[in-house]
C-alpha cells in the first residue's frame, strides 16, 4: 500500500501500480473536498492493471481525519465517540462509510482498538495525547470497536482494527520516534487484547500491526516483524485469518534503522500481508526484495502466496475482482 499526497507528482505512484503491481493506495497529507478525492481515485483505479485497488484513508475523527472539506462530515474524536449510544455510533459509522464509498475509498484505517488508562492518557504519545482511544475500559472499548466495524462494513467499506497488540501503554509515538515504544506489560492474556478479539469476532477486514515492542510476547522483534505476535498470538491463539497490514514503514522513525528491503520481507516472513509505505520511492526496493527472497526460499514464497490469497479473498468479498 503506497501513499498518495495531494498535489504531488504521481509518477512514482503510477510506476508502483503499473510496474510493481502494487494493489493498494492510501491518501496521506490531508485532502480537501470530495471532488478532488474522487478524481484521484478514478485516475488511480484506471492506472491499475490488475484487480481494483484497495483505496484507504485514516478517517478516525478528531485529530486524525485525512479527508476534509465539502463532502466529508467533521467527526468528533474517538474519545467523544465513545460517549455515544450504540445506535448513534453505528449510524455515524455508516454515514462515514457512505461518504468514503461515494469518492471511491473502500478501506478506512479505523477503528482504533487501543485501550489507554485514563491517568496515562496525557503521557501516551501515539493515542491518548490525541484522544484517539474510545475509552479506558477494554470491555467498553471492545463494544465501540465492534459497533464501528459493523457500521463501516455494512456500508461496504473495509474496517481496520489497529494497532495490534496495542499502543495504549507507550509514551513514544512510533511515527516520530524510536524511543519510548516498548510496552513491558502486554502479554498473551492481557485484557487490552479484548477489543481486538471483538474485532475478529465481528469479521473485521484488516488488522494493523504496530511497530512497538512487547518483550513479554517477543523479546527480539518489533510487533510487525514478530512471528510469535502475528502468526502465534493473532492468527493461532486469537484465530484471525484475515488481512494484516503494517503501520507505516516508510517515514516512521520507529523503523528507520531497519533497511528498507527488510521492512517488507520481515513482515511477510512473520505472517503479514500488506506492507504500507508512505514513501513511493521505496516500492521498487521492497518489491525486488520480496521477489528475490521468494525465488531463493520456498518457505518464504509460500508465505507470499498465502498473503496474496488473503488480500485477493478480501477484495473478492468487497467486489474488487474484475472478470474478463
Image (spheres, rainbow, N blue to C red):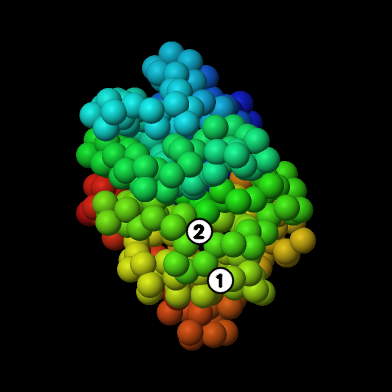
Q: Splitting the image into 4 quarters, where does residue 147 fall?
A: top left
Q: Residue at x 59, y 62 (%)?
A: 185
In space, the residues marked 1 and 2 are separated at their CA atoms by: 10 Å
Which one is in front, 150 or 33?
150
Which one is in front, 78 or 41?
78
- Callout 1 environment at 10 Å: few (<14), some (14 to 19), or many (20+)? many
Which one is in front, 120 or 44?
120
Where residue 210 sits: x, y (%)?
Answer: 56, 55
Quadrant in the picture for the C terminus: bottom left
Residue 165 marker? 2
Where residue 119 sits: x, y (%)?
Answer: 60, 39
| As drawn, 184 above or below 104 | below
How many marks the image carries: the answer is: 2
Q: Is residue 195 left or right of residue 152?
A: right
Q: Residue at x 26, y 41 (%)?
A: 150
Q: Is residue 177 left or right of residue 163?
A: right
Q: Residue at x 43, y 13 (%)?
A: 70
Q: Is residue 284 left or right of residue 139?
A: right
Where residue 13 sits: x, y (%)?
Answer: 57, 44
| As drawn, 31 above or below 196 | above
Q: Are marks 1 and 2 in contact (CB under 8 Å)?
A: yes
Residue at the extreme top = 70
Residue 217 marker? 1
| As drawn, 273 above or below 140 | below
Which one is in front, 13 or 152?
152
**Can see residue 319?**
yes
Where residue 261 sits: x, y (%)?
Answer: 66, 65
Give the mark nearer the N terminus: 1 vs 2.
Answer: 2
Amino acid at each position: 500500500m503506497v501513499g498518495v499526497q495531494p498535489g504531488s507528482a504521481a509518477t512514482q505512484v503510477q510506476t508502483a501500480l503499473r510496474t510493481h503491481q502494487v494493489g493498494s493506495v492510501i491518501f496521506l497529507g490531508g485532502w480537501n473536498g470530495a471532488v478532488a478525492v474522487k478524481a484521484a481515485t478514478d485516475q488511480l483505479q484506471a492506472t491499475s492493471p490488475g484487480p481494483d485497488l484497495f483505496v484507504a484513508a485514516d478517517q478516525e475523527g478528531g485529530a486524525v481525519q485525512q479527508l476534509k472539506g465539502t463532502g466529508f462530515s467533521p467527526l468528533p474524536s474517538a474519545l467523544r465517540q465513545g460517549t455515544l449510544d450504540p445506535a448513534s455510533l453505528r449510524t455515524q459509522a455508516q454515514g462515514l462509510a457512505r461518504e468514503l464509498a461515494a469518492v471511491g475509498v473502500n478501506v478506512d484505517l479505523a477503528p482504533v482498538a487501543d485501550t489507554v488508562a485514563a491517568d496515562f492518557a496525557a503521557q501516551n504519545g501515539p493515542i491518548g495525547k490525541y484522544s484517539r482511544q474510545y475509552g479506558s475500559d477494554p470491555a467498553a472499548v471492545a463494544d465501540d470497536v465492534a459497533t464501528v466495524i459493523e457500521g463501516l462494513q455494512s456500508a461496504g467499506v473495509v474496517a481496520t482494527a489497529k494497532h495490534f497488540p496495542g499502543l495504549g501503554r507507550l509514551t513514544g509515538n512510533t511515527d516520530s520516534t524510536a524511543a519510548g515504544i516498548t510496552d513491558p506489560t502486554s502479554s498473551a492474556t492481557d485484557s487490552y487484547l479484548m477489543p481486538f478479539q471483538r474485532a475478529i469476532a465481528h469479521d473485521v477486514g484488516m488488522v494493523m500491526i504496530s511497530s512497538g515492542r512487547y518483550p513479554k510476547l517477543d523479546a527480539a522483534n518489533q510487533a510487525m516483524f514478530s512471528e510469535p505476535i502475528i502468526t502465534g498470538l493473532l492468527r493461532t491463539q486469537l484465530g484471525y485469518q484475515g488481512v494484516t497490514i503494517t503501520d507505516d514503514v516508510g517515514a516512521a522513525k520507529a523503523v528507520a534503522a531497519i533497511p528498507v528491503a527488510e521492512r517488507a520481507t520481515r513482515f511477510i516472513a512473520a505472517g503479514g500481508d500488506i506492507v504500507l509505505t508512505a514513501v513511493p520511492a521505496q516500492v521498487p526496493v521492497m518489491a525486488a526484495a520480496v521477489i528475490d527472497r521468494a525465488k531463493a526460499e520456498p518457505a518464504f514464497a509460500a508465505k507470499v502466496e498465502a498473503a496474496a490469497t488473503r488480500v485477493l479473498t478480501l477484495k473478492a468479498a468487497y467486489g474488487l475482482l474484475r472478470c474478463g
